[in-house]
Image (tube, rainbow, N blue to C red):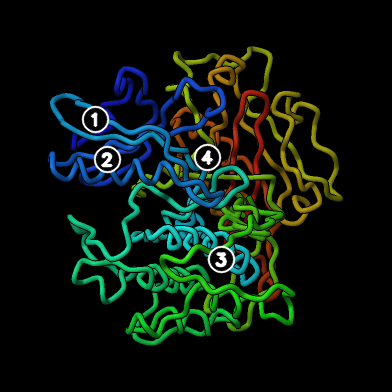
Amino acid sequence: MNENPKLWEGQVVDGRFPLLQYLGGGPRSAVFATATGDSSLPNAAIKLVETDPEDAEVQLAQWTEAAALSHPHLLRLFQTGRCQLDGTQAIFVVMERADEDLSQVLSLRPLSAAETSEALEPVLEGLAYLHAQGLVHGRLRPSNILAVGDQLKLSSDRLLPAGESRGRRDEPDAYDAPETAGGEIGPAADVWSLGVILVEALTQQLPGATLPRLPAPFDDIARHCLQPDPRDRWTFGEIQARLKPPAATPAPARRVEAGRPAAHARGRYGLLAVALAVVLALAAILAVPRFLNRRAEPQTPEPAAAAPAPERTPPPERVAEPSPAAESPSPSATPALSPSPAPPEEPSPAPASPSPSATPAPNPSPAPPAEEVPQAQDAVASQAQGAVASGVLQQVLPEVPAKARRSIHGSVKVGVKVRVNASGSVEDAQLASQGPSSYFAGLAVEAARQWKFSPLAAGGQAAPSQWLLHFEFDSGATRVQPERMAP
């Protein structure tokens, strides 16, 4: 694979799939945003894989089989084929483009018990469906648990027939069940991987020789998922029965075994389409797999959890950011099918507009001067004004020239970490996630440096704090959601 796949941006695969924004990849693969030409499929990604002729035939056959699957919690595959780019022979698959993946959320905070419970439902449904088809996922990782709109989905580009070898093996890691060392992967291996992810979701740590303390019922579920002998591991039916005992759920728990068709219901998720419901509830990050799209929401600390979720202000409808390292397409920004999140030429700010516009949060302080009020097009400072009053004194939104705003297709999301001194002023602002455009990232950082926060009291004295500001730009407005990270 090209040492710098980003140089392929702008080329066209198979005469119809442009390589737009480079999203990430591995040593032998690269993922790009693309356009399908179908208005019903506005957000798509294309994965290029360098492989030898024999492996190519096997992989193309597996992609064809996966494309025929239909389940609300599986990423859809649309088109496969062969291509050549700058002398590199590759195969490709065009698929749904995800807004976010679970690994991005866990890099910032653990899930709450409620979020974890909501996240398990769609994951169990998707895996049970695969196993009923005689398939295994084989690569269950946080980066392969994806949020697509309000749905949580599993990646589907590396599925395998149960009992078959993975072929060219990646370096084994903690997510791989002990028995996969021989190369063969069965349904129980997915259960092991699920147990590892469960521990990581609640603690932000991988399980070691001894399991950390987890809140019920996750301690019991994790222990039975991580049994060394695959015959001792729970089935998905047993996991669901423990997650929602019959006393609380009238319908009996179902037992799902490989090769046996299982009924699966499309669960209701009212939430967190992040938190991105796993994304949040992800009623929170994953609840409406926005867990993935919500960064954090007020939570009651779980006494048994290894790491409590950080306090934060209520989230906006959704905030997503990228994970370049993930092999599956989980971009930093809501899909942009145009190669230019950044304007084609350096936009010049409107002469009469102040730069940037400030939106003071409602509080007992005197109203800010008129010149600090944002223009109508940038008028969304926060959807939770009451929350802004607790901790944030002044929000500053970037001044975006109309020409630059018109270049946005979809939305551009940028995360900025700010360090606040004891007096409430920003001492430092650094990018947490740039998104697809360095231009908009620069606007967000510059605006973040001008925010003002309420001094925090610790031990009777003012104390510094740290915040994560989630900026979202689209063609009509700029939004921001502040999240306190520490203390």
Tell me the residue that label 2 is attached to: 60
Q: Which residue is mark 1?
A: 82
Q: Secondary structure at mark 4?
A: strand
Q: Earlier in the sequence, mark 3 or mark 2?
A: 2
Residue 189 placement: quadrant: bottom left
Which is more N-terminal, label 4 or label 2?
Answer: 2
- The residue at the point 74 percent across, 37 percent down is 359
* Residue 370 in view, yes or no: yes
Q: Nearer the viewer, mark 3 or mark 2?
A: 2
Which residue is disc 3 drawn over? 120
SS type, badge 3: helix
Q: Residue 310 location in percent, x, y?
A: 60, 65
**Three-letter code for the amino acid on which mark 3 is drawn:** Leu
The three-letter code of the residue at mark 1 reads: Arg
Disc 2 versus disc 4: distance between alpha carbons? 36 Å
Q: Residues within 10 Å of mark 1 (few under 14, many from 20)?
A: some
Q: Which residue is mark 4?
A: 414
- Quadrant (top left, top right, bottom left, bottom right) of the C terminus: bottom right
Foreground: disc 4 or disc 1: 1
For the residues labelled 4 and 1, the Cα–Cα distance comes to: 34 Å
Point 74% across, 78% down: residue = 248
